[in-house]
Amino acid sequence: MSGPPPTSFRESRRSTRVPLRVVISVEGVPENLSCEGETIVVNLHGALLTTAVPLTQGLKISVQVYLTGKRSGARVAYVDPSNPLRCGIELDHPHNIWGVPLPPSDWTDPSAEKDRR
């Protein structure tokens, strides 16, 4: 069987994903929603996480990472149809709020550099 050689696959993420489990709190903005959750995978632009209550796609939220004390606005970009407690979020501004001590080289972020000073 002949055919074209396999092409290399490059994931279309804006920044490298890092498996990391940290406890977070989530608040709905402006909804009166508050719950805890945990990250599964993080990157500079957002995270895949699980929450104690289901969130809806497009919901504006505020996320606080207990480990770092950092907070960021975000929106729910994806809700897993087979598990509504699992969702993907996009941070309002790319930032290492997660506390990844040695972030990947593509996590270049001026505000993260400022935090190191």
Image (cartoon, rainbow, N blue to C red):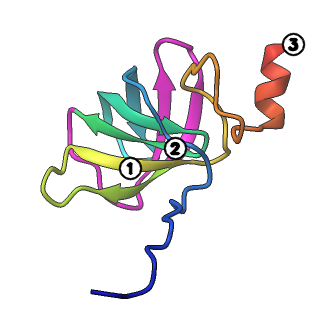
**Between discs 1 and 3, the one toward the N terminus:** 1
Within the magenta stretch, is there residue 13?
Answer: no
State yes or no: discs 1 and 2 in contact (Cβ < 8 Å).
yes
Badge 1, how many Cα within 10 Å: few under 14, some, many 20+? many
Q: Mark 2 is on which residue type?
A: Gly
Image position, residue 20 (x, y; %): 42, 26
Image position, residue 5 (x, y; %): 45, 78
Within the magenta stretch, is there residue 65?
Answer: yes
Q: Which residues are magenta?
A: 52-74
Residue sitting at x 87%, y 13%: 117
Q: Which residue is mark 2?
A: 46
Q: Mark 3 is on which residue type?
A: Arg
Residues at marks 1 and 3, CA–CA distance in whole angstroms: 30 Å
In the structure shown, which secondary structural element does the residue marked by tag 2 occupy?
strand
Q: Is residue 84 above or below residue 104?
A: below
Q: Which residue is mark 3?
A: 117
**Between discs 1 and 2, the one toward the N terminus:** 2
Image position, residue 52 (x, y; %): 21, 32
